[in-house]
Image (cartoon, helix red, strand yellow):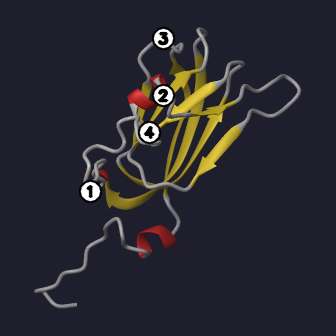
Amino acid sequence: MSFNNPYYVGLQNVGSYQVSGIPFATSSIAVPASSGTPTQVSFPFVTQRITIRNISSGDLRVGFSSNGVKATNYFVIPAGSATSTFPQSEFKVKVNTVFLLANSTTPTSASVFAELTNIDSNLLVNSGPAGSNWSGSVGVG
């Protein structure tokens, strides 16, 4: 490596995703009812894997924008029950934020665990050639 061409970590840096991630965990997140403002969980670095757990009796919406979880670009993690473990979903995605919202008029709660890279979250620009793609449209919630 020369001083003229320094090597930096970045979104296309394979090594950043091959090593174990930096742990990020938060639990008992209060998630408002579907008519409320979505709860935003922001990460200090770009993620390599996220596990979201629904820890309540109501279904949970998860998306990658506020508009997505309020409209139709989200996925649902179903409610748990007294006879089963709490459902969770795991995703291998490069994001710096997720949005949570209850799928009904009753508030719910969730836990989030993420494996973080050492890539600064500011390097992840949520836009493409046609403008913002993570706005809750074009199939990206």
The image quarter in which residue 138 lies: top left
Q: Which residue is mark 4?
A: 64
Q: Which amino acid type corresponds to the residue marked 1 in the rendered image?
A: Leu
Residue sitting at x 37%, y 42%:
134
Looking at the image, tell me whether mark 1 or mark 2 is earlier in sequence order.
Answer: 2
Q: Which amino acid type corresponds to the residue marked 2 in the rendered image?
A: Val
Looking at the image, tell me whether mark 4 or mark 3 is earlier in sequence order.
Answer: 3
Q: Which amino acid type corresponds to the residue marked 4 in the rendered image?
A: Phe
Q: Which residue is mark 1?
A: 123
Residue sitting at x 49%, y 36%:
63
Local packing at callout 4 (Cα closer than 10 Å; few below 14, some 14-19, many 20+) is many
As helix, strand or loop, the secondary structure at mark 3 comes to loop
Residue sitting at x 67%, y 27%:
55
Q: Which residue is mark 3?
A: 35
As helix, strand or loop, the secondary structure at mark 4 comes to loop
* 121 and 103: which is toward the camera: 103
